[in-house]
Image (spheres, rainbow, N blue to C red):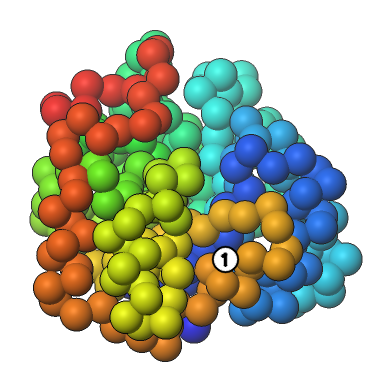
Amino acid sequence: MQFVTAHGANIPALGFGVFRMSDAEVERVVPAALDAGFRHFDTAQIYNNEAALGRALQAAGVKRDDLFLTTKVWVENYSDASFAASVRDSLDRLKVDQVDLLLLHWPGDSVPVADQVAMLNEVRAAGQTRLIGVSNYNSSQLKQAISRANAPIVTNQIELHPYLDQSAMIATARETGTAITAYYGMADGRVPQDALLQDIGARYGKTAAQVGLRWLIQQGFVALSKTANPGRVAENAAIFDFTLADQDMAAISALASPNGRIVSPEGLAPDWAA
């Protein structure tokens, strides 16, 4: 298994995300993901499928120490009255005493970053998570979170795919030693249909989707893959037996544009340029 290391923490480079999956889909696909070698699973309170993931992993009988579990606190729980209780509920649903990584899901526009991080510090001190991080923070928010955290912010989970220029955030992450975790790596279905990626893949005997994931991994990012189809899981995992040439990496990166963002919900998303 390949890892991304940040501040001494080892995060499996390829994760399996369950965003927009029903309970039935999660319980059907997780066994296939485990069979394909996935051990890093990513969910969130707002996905409403933590319990299904917990059931599926428990039923599979995989040792807890062999898993890397990530979940995210939803913005409506950013209060002293709700934050810790919501994390305890997440642990109960996942059937674990501690997650490996707990993230603040979005910065939102109502609770200051300093207050969000203070609550994150408390649940980590209580032993409810091993590692802490953020998601969808801009560069200035990431730096503020780092300054306020009592333990390293090991990752910022962000939208990242060939069509979005994230060079500014990547530079900030590298400057601060923070890992980047990439979500929406398939750009909501655009990557598998991309003619350039298909052509590149044909030269390696790989699909466009595998090329897209490899492009992320090869830059040193954690990549979250996702499929509700058990038959496609093994394809997503088979990205460690080839290396994209420098010219192919550059060609894929050249697809990026500043307006390539897909996910930017009002009231949750920050000023991305800050």
Q: Position of residue 112 (x, y in %)?
A: 33, 19
Task: State the residue in front, 206 or 266.
Answer: 206
Left or right for 196, reference 26: left
The quarter of the picture where the C terminus appears is top left
Left or right for 142, reference 97: left
Above or below for 30 versus 89: below
Mark 1 secondary-structure assignment = strand
Q: Which image quadrant is residue 235 in?
A: bottom right
Q: Residue at x 42, y 88 (%)?
A: 241
Left or right for 122, reference 269: right
Task: State the residue in front, 198 or 169.
Answer: 198
Q: Position of residue 126 (x, y in %)?
A: 58, 48
* Residue positioned most to the right: 59
Q: Which image quadrant is residue 95 in?
A: bottom right
Above or below for 226 versus 235: above
Left or right for 272, reference 68: left
Q: Residue at x 24, y 42 (%)?
A: 164
* Residue positioned most to the bottom: 241
Above or below for 103 versus 243: above
Task: State the residue in front, 265 or 119.
Answer: 265
Q: Residue at x 72, y 78 (%)?
A: 35
Q: Position of residue 64 (x, y in %)?
A: 71, 71
Q: Position of residue 249 (x, y in %)?
A: 19, 68
| Total tally of numbered discs in the picture | 1
Residue 69 visible in the shown view: no
Looking at the picture, which amino acid does disc 1 mark? His
Task: State the residue in front, 41 or 127.
Answer: 41
Q: Which residue is mark 1?
A: 40
Q: Residue at x 14, y 48 (%)?
A: 167
Residue 208 visible in the shown view: yes
Give the class, few, some or many, for how many residues have Cα within 10 Å of label 1's Cα (few <14, many ≥20): many
